[in-house]
Amino acid sequence: MYHNVGQPRPGEYPGLTTPTAKFTAQIRFMAKMGYTGITPREWLRWRDEAATLPERPVMLVFDDAYADASRNAFPLLEQLGWGAACMVVTGYIGATNRWDEIDNLPSQQLMSADEIRAWAKRGIEFGGHTCHHVDLRNASDEIAEQEIARCKADLTALLASEPASFAYPYGGVSAAACAAAQKHFKLAFTTWPGLLHLGVAPHLTPRIGFMPGETRIGIRIHLRWGKNPYVSLHDRCIALLDITRRKVATLSERFQ
Ligand SMILES: [Zn+2]
């Protein structure tokens, strides 16, 4: 999973923008290891119709459809002959990331309808990401259904073909969202780490979030095991330290 590819902006969520040079290095490294980028439809054809896949397939998924990804990432993938997926917030095509702007995060340009149509013919497969980038965990069942159904209808009208895949904004899955995703799409991506294999529930597909600073060893570990045990251990230690710090602060307040 990637989001922006280009120049990181001050004040944005850390790790969401992968500088172009780092992205290029990560992709070239994966290509050197023998990986080939595939699309969700290629995976589905392999799963359902026994179509062939490259020996080492990797599915890159770009969330939110930022214009910088189409400028800085897609041409390299096209050059390598890699397919990839890009998840569109259909209510804001050609506009900016309004869902972040209300939290005072920097504005970022989203792809236009023309860019989406053009890249759909050049190896990028577009999928849904709701109409308004709604956190479906906080939405009513009706809104979840509406956001997902309308998003599919918008993309079908734009591309003149039904999209196959969907990504839950913020990785937020609820029972209603999962049911709606199952009704309208063949595959839905979470943000839970892991590898895609036949045992995975298609509407709870895991994804590895590649950070800009991902090392070659990190990439190898992620692609082999779906998560990096060192990163998990590091995160757990940080959480434990945080709990200890808060407990000490509470105790010292009590004894003052
Ligand atoms: Zn998103």
Image (cartoon, rainbow, N blue to C red):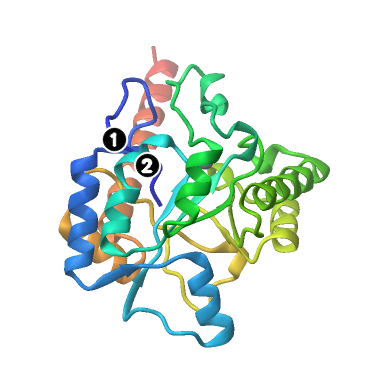
Image location (x, y in percent) of residue 69:
37, 42
- Coordinates of residue 175 in the picture (x, y in percent): 72, 55
* Residue in view at x 52 percent, y 28 percent: 97
- Could you say where residue 205 lies in the image, as x and y percent from the top left? 53, 63
State the residue lying farthest toward the top: 256
Q: Residue at x 68, y 53 (%)?
A: 156
Q: Which residue is mark 2?
A: 69
Which image quadrant for residue 33?
Answer: bottom left
* Marks 1 and 2, how far apart at CA: 7 Å
Q: Nearer the viewer, residue 245 or 81?
A: 81
Inspect this view and state whether residue 46 appears.
yes
The amino acid beneath tag 2 is Ala
Q: Residue at x 53, y 48 (%)?
A: 117
Amino acid type, mark 1: Gly
Which secondary structure, mark 2? helix
Q: Is residue 214 visible?
A: no
How many labels sit on residues?
2
Residue at the farthest bottom position? 50
Q: Is residue 243 left or right of residue 113?
A: left
Labelled pair 1, 2 in contact (Cβ < 8 Å): yes
Q: Please state the horizontal and vertical placement of residue 132, each as a whole percent of the image.
A: 65, 34
Q: Quadrant of the C terminus?
A: top left
